[in-house]
Amino acid sequence: MPSDQISFTDVEYANRRRVSRREQFLDTMDSTIPWSRRVGLIEPFTYSSSRGRKPKALETMLRMYLLQAWFSLSDEGVENAIYDSYAMHRALKGNQWCFGMKAHIGVDAGAGYVHSMTATAASVHDLDQITHLVRADDEVVYADACYQGAERRPDVADDPHLSQVEFRVAARKSKLAAMAGPDRAAESRKASVRAKVERPFLIVKRDFGFTKTRYRGMAKNLNHLGVLFASADWVMRARAVALMG
């Protein structure tokens, strides 16, 4: 990293004695995210011109964008966060666009990391997104009860790969009470695997404070959610490394 490159902690109070949870979070993310690799992925798509004001370094722009996503800052707010560290501790309020939408994610059953994501209007049924969440090498898929009948959908049954996938879908709660003991145990094992999908949502809502949309239109919100769920993977990775010492 270049010596003149700002880090996340540069936008926090540098002279305080007590390290806040936010500073700890920024330090963790700073050491977890592979910055050079991420910049390398973005660089080919970056606009460059010899005219006008010299643009900021690409890594600086990436860091600013992530700060905006993690702390729900406006464009002006994130600029203030860079030039005035106190801005990071203010709640930026004002008119916000809010509309019904929901995110759908696929999570690796082993690692728990998000590997695919879509976002739709709230009126779209979860089943309509199943084909976008299954990976090409997936053989078994765990899902909650709202995905009942996934294997019978034409876009699944007619697909050479998806038609071979085993869908282990949770039973509806109304049927659990009537099940025999072994069947309830099998449902419990399904639930323990499927529950891994909840952790990324918890991080996005609790750690990043994403409880309502900030943008008008699906495209911007889809992009925002993509950044947040990718960041949730980094958070889970950092916490796993910390536990291993």
Image (tube, rainbow, N blue to C red):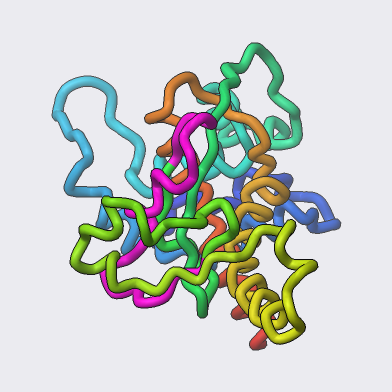
- Is 174 contained in the magenta span? no
The percent coordinates of residue 69 (x first, y second) are 54, 40
Judged left or right of residue 110, residue 175 is right
Q: Which residue sits at x=34%, y=57%?
A: 38
Q: Which residue sits at x=14%, y=29%?
A: 50
Residue 210 appears anywhere in the view = yes
**Towards the viewer: 221 or 70:** 221
Q: Is residue 158 above or below residue 192?
A: above
The percent coordinates of residue 206 (x first, y second) are 72, 49
Number of marks: 0
Q: Farthest top residue?
A: 95
Q: Which residue sits at x=66%, y=75%?
A: 187
**Towards the viewer: 171 or 216:** 171
The percent coordinates of residue 135 (x first, y second) are 32, 66
Residue 30 appears anywhere in the view = no
Q: Quadrant of residue 90?
A: top right
Judged left or right of residue 183, residue 159 is left
Q: Farthest right residue?
A: 18
**Towards the viewer: 84 or 188:** 188
What's drawn in magenta, residue-wise? 119-142
Q: Is residue 178 above or below residue 58?
A: below
**Towards the viewer: 90 or 185:** 185
